[in-house]
Amino acid sequence: MKFYIMAAIMLIFSSAAESQELFAKEAHPEEFCLALNIYHEARGSNFADQLAVADVVLNRVDDSRYPNSVCNVVYDGRHKPSWKDGSPVPIRNQCQFSWYCDGKSDDPKDTDSWRKAQQSAYMMMNYGDFRGITEGATHYHANYVSPSWARDFQLIGRIGDHIFYRWK
């Protein structure tokens, strides 16, 4: 039964109007932030990997060591005043998620990948079926890097293009 419900949801999303947005940033900011993180962290990966990336964000929201909202977790990092107008901007390589402080535009360019990221975010925020896919992981990295911090955490395993860890 769950499969049919999920298939119906995916069909509704895939046949949505030509609009690039499935949910507006203003109306659903937490889903928007989660979708943006999924897009930038796992847009080329499989559905399970996208859900796992989202699960890590939600695990951090539930962990007292991190901010208590999706957007605050996604945008967590050190900031400095902008030279243009003094507004806070992220410091390069000082963020929890590298896409946020890489100096590039954060606007999604690939419409199909953006739509899939929004679908994944919607499912993670509104249905509990996939919560726990990472067994409590709060960290991950791409499978082609070996960060020094990884040895300080318990390895959970690999899903798609990412390797997942949790606090020891």
Image: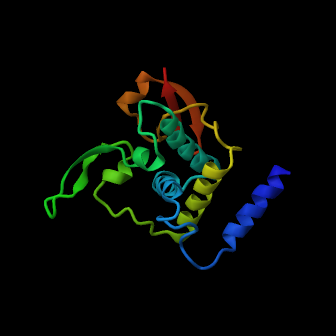
Residue 89 image offset from top left, x and y in percent: 24, 54
Occupied quadrant, residue 16 = bottom right
The residue drawn where x is 16% and y is 63% is 85
Q: Quadrant of residue 132?
A: top right
Is residue 8 shown left or right of residue 23?
right
The residue at the point 78 percent across, 63 percent down is 8
**What is the x, y in percent for residue 69?**
46, 45
Residue 76 to residue 11: above or below: above
From the top left corner, tell me how far across and down residue 7 is, in percent: 77, 60
- Tell how many labels: 0
The residue that appears at 56% across and 66% down in the rendered structure is 23
Q: Is residue 161 visible?
A: no
Residue at image location 40% in from the left, 46% down from the top: 72
Tell me if residue 9 comes above or below residue 64 in the rendering: below
| Residue 120 visible, this orientation | yes
Report whether 43 appears left or right of 106.
Answer: right
Q: Nearer the viewer, residue 127 or 36?
A: 127
Residue 18, by quadrant, is bottom right
